[in-house]
Structures are given as structure tokens and as C-alpha cells.
Image (cartoon, rainbow, N blue to C red):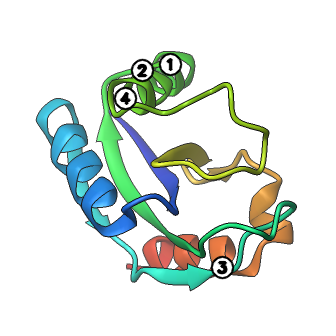
Amino acid sequence: MNDCIVGIGSNINPIENIRKMLCLLSKDHLVKKHSKWIKTKPIGITDQDDFINGAVRVKTHHCREEFNLYLKQLEDKMGRDRSQVKFGPRNIDLDIIVWNNEIVDEDYHSRDFLKKSVDELLVG
């Protein structure tokens, strides 16, 4: 069983979309716990609503590549609009940050809110 931490972000109905995503995720994988939620200013395109960000610790039987594909399919299932610009508004954004205790996403080092959320789950 693989242990991972997934970064979560949303600025379109974030409370509702994060709740829905956690519910869907828990149907297919063992959701251990999530971090506290942090309100953040958008990066890149600043003329949009603030984001709610956090992270969730998950156990999965999938390999990393399969789980990443699963997350992208979950985003699609929730209506993620991939035609939007890279840093534009989104209803859900899911990224593997830690895979089996190894940091695999460089954003961990450059985004304080992400580091804080992930570190909360690493010690817990």
C-alpha cells in the first residue's frame, strides 16, 4: 500500500468542491486525514477569488502514475475546465506532493502554504 499526500486547491465554490472531492476520493482510497484549510491569494493571475488550500493523506494500492491519472480523472469528473489559463480559477486542483515519504513536487519548497499543510500531515 502506498502512502501519499495530495495538495488541494480551489477558488470556485471551494468549501463545497473540496468536501465533494474528499467524499469521492474516500470511495476509492483510504483517506487518513486532511490538514487545516488555508485561504491564499492567487498566484500569477491575481484578478480572481482567493483560494482555499490544504492537503490530504491517502493510502492507495495504485502506483504513482496510476494514482496521478486517477486524480486528473477526479478533477475532470468534478468539471475541471482545462481550457483555462494555467493559473486561472479552478473548482479543484489536485497534485501529488509526497509519495512514500519522498517529496515529489517542487512547489513544496516554494509555496509556504503548501509546505505548512504537508508538514502538518507528515508529523501527524
Where does label 2 land, which residue?
A: 73
Residue denoted by label 4: 74
Query: Mark 1: which amino acid?
Result: Leu
Q: Give the image location of residue 63, x and y in percent.
A: 47, 20
Residue 2, horizontal then vertical, whole percent: 40, 36
Of mark 4 and mark 3, the one earlier in the sequence is 4
51 left or right, relative to 15: right
Viewer-closest of 13 and 29 = 13
Q: Which mark is residue 113?
A: 3
Crowding near the residue tagged with mark 2, few <14, some 14–19, many ≥20 C-alpha atoms within 10 Å: few
Circle 4: residue type = Leu
Q: Please report contact status of discs 2 and 3: CB closer than 8 Å, yes or no.
A: no
Dot label at residue 17: none
Instruction: Tell me, yes or no, whether the two marked residues, 4 and 3, touch with CB atoms within 8 Å.
Output: no
Q: Is residue 85 above or below residue 106?
A: above
Q: Is 83 drawn above or below residue 99 in the view shown?
A: above
For disc 1, the marked residue is 69
